[in-house]
Image (spheres, rainbow, N blue to C red):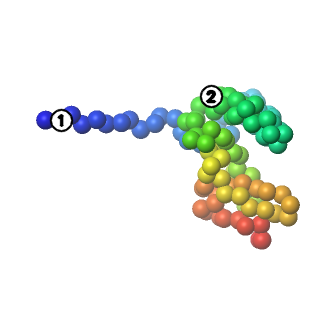
Amino acid sequence: MGHAVMTHAPTQPSLIRTTNLTTTLATQVDDLLNQADDYADNRELTASTLIHAQVIHLIGIRPPASGELARCTCQGCYCDRIYDAAAARTYMDGTVEFAQCPYCADEHPLTGDE
């Protein structure tokens, strides 16, 4: 008779709300993600990737498959989720692009035409 192999569910969350972090840590994470954005804007992708990895380690979430994090910038609510950037849904409001986390995109999807 064969043995069943059971895998354990991951113990790390796949996203985090910054309100669940200390103020110091939330500020540090925000500063790091701003730096990563600056590097990405300048096509310094290795530096951006390294900063995302540092943030993932700092906040203790499961590393996303994409390796990149996003911050929800939904204008329909105050959302402070940090999550896998591959799951972001974006919309334009004028010339500014905003990202919604999966929760916001399901609960109150925005298109920029509101």
Quadrant location of the N terminus in the rendered image:
top left
Task: Give the Cα distance between marks 1 and 2.
Answer: 38 Å
Mark 2 highlights which residue?
A: 57
Q: Position of residue 45 (x, y in %)?
A: 75, 36
Residue for point 59% across, 31% down: 60
| Residue 61 lies in quadrant | top right
The residue lying toward the viewer, choosing from 101 and 97, is 97
| Residue 82 lies in quadrant | top right
Kindly indicate whether the residue at mark 2 contacts the one at mark 1 (C-beta within 8 angstroms): no
Residue for point 21% across, 34% down: 3
| Residue 49 lies in quadrant | top right
> Which amino acid, mark 2?
His
The residue lying toward the viewer, choosing from 16 and 35, is 35
Query: For the view shown, which residue lies furthest in the bottom direction?
Result: 113
Up/down of 77 relative to 52, above or below: below
Q: Position of residue 37 (x, y in %)?
A: 79, 40
Residue for point 80% across, 40% down: 43
Alpha-carbon neighbours of circle 2 within 10 Å: few (<14), some, or many (≥20)?
few
Q: What secondary structure is marked by label 1?
A: loop
Q: How many marks?
A: 2
Mark 1 highlights which residue?
A: 2
Residue for point 74% across, 52% down: 73
The reply, left or right, for residue 7 in relation to residue 54 is left
- Disc with the residue nearer the chain's start (1 vs 2): 1
Q: Is residue 81 visible?
A: no
> Which amino acid, mark 1?
Gly
